[in-house]
Image: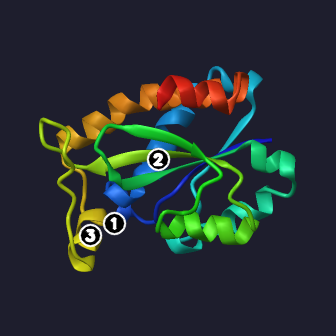
Amino acid sequence: MKLVVGLGNPGEEYEKTRHNTGRILVGMLEKKLEPENSKLKIKFLTPDTFMNNSGRAVAPLVKSKKDLKDLVVIYDDIDLPLGKMKISFNRSSGGHNGLGSIIKSLKSEEFLRIRIGISPATPSGKLKKPTGEKAVLNFLLGEYKKPELEIIKKLSKKVVEAVVTIFTESKDKAMSLYN
């Protein structure tokens, strides 16, 4: 079974926050891939657990090495500019607690991630991310502004293409095309 997981927090108060970027995108992907999904057979999951316990929701669905190969986790990345994405494989959590929970529960880092940039950037591309634990937390749990959500919506087309490429061709092809 192909599994695409969107990380975030459950509950209305988190719906449009930057930390819910994975959940937001998986909702968009599910709608956009609905007609094609009869042949792709992808299960979409937005865990009902809070971010730090994401592994509890994912682990029961990933029981083998094959399942690991068919797992894609989508999540927010404060180290990438808003509107950018990066596909990675077999890497550490990079300090992301939701991803860390999944790695710990699966006892493996051998799965694909699609990291979605959420930080503002200067016109030259220099990141303007917040500094300090409290500022970072406030930023992550802050709601997207309408223009920022439009950027995420626009990026969803590229994420759909990447997911289709991953499942119809290979992770390597997707990484070479979309990174």
Query: How busy is the neighbourhood of tag 3: few (under 14 within 10 Å), some, or many (20 plus)?
Result: some
- Residue 100 image-quadrant placement: bottom right
Circle 3 residue? 136
Q: What's the residue at 53%, 66% (across, down)?
A: 98
Q: Earlier in the sequence, mark 1 or mark 3?
A: 1
Q: In the rendered picture of this protein, how many numbered marks are placed on residues?
A: 3
Query: SS at mark 2?
Result: strand
Percent from the top left, x then y, of residue 85? 42, 39
Query: How busy is the neighbourhood of tag 2: few (under 14 within 10 Å), some, or many (20 plus)?
Result: many
User: Looking at the picture, which amino acid does disc 3 mark?
Assistant: Val
In screen coordinates, is 118 left or right of 24? left
Q: Earlier in the sequence, mark 1 or mark 2?
A: 1
User: Looking at the picture, which amino acid does disc 1 mark?
Assistant: Glu
Residue extending furthest left? Answer: 123
Q: Earlier in the sequence, mark 3 or mark 2?
A: 2
Query: SS at mark 1?
Result: helix
Decide if residue 163 is in sight here.
Answer: yes
Circle 1 residue? 13
Percent from the top left, x then y, of residue 159? 49, 32
For the residues labelled 3 and 2, the Cα–Cα distance comes to 17 Å
For the residues labelled 1 and 3, the Cα–Cα distance comes to 18 Å
Percent from the top left, x then y, of residue 155? 37, 31
Circle 2 residue? 115
Q: What's the residue at 46%, 65% (across, down)?
A: 9
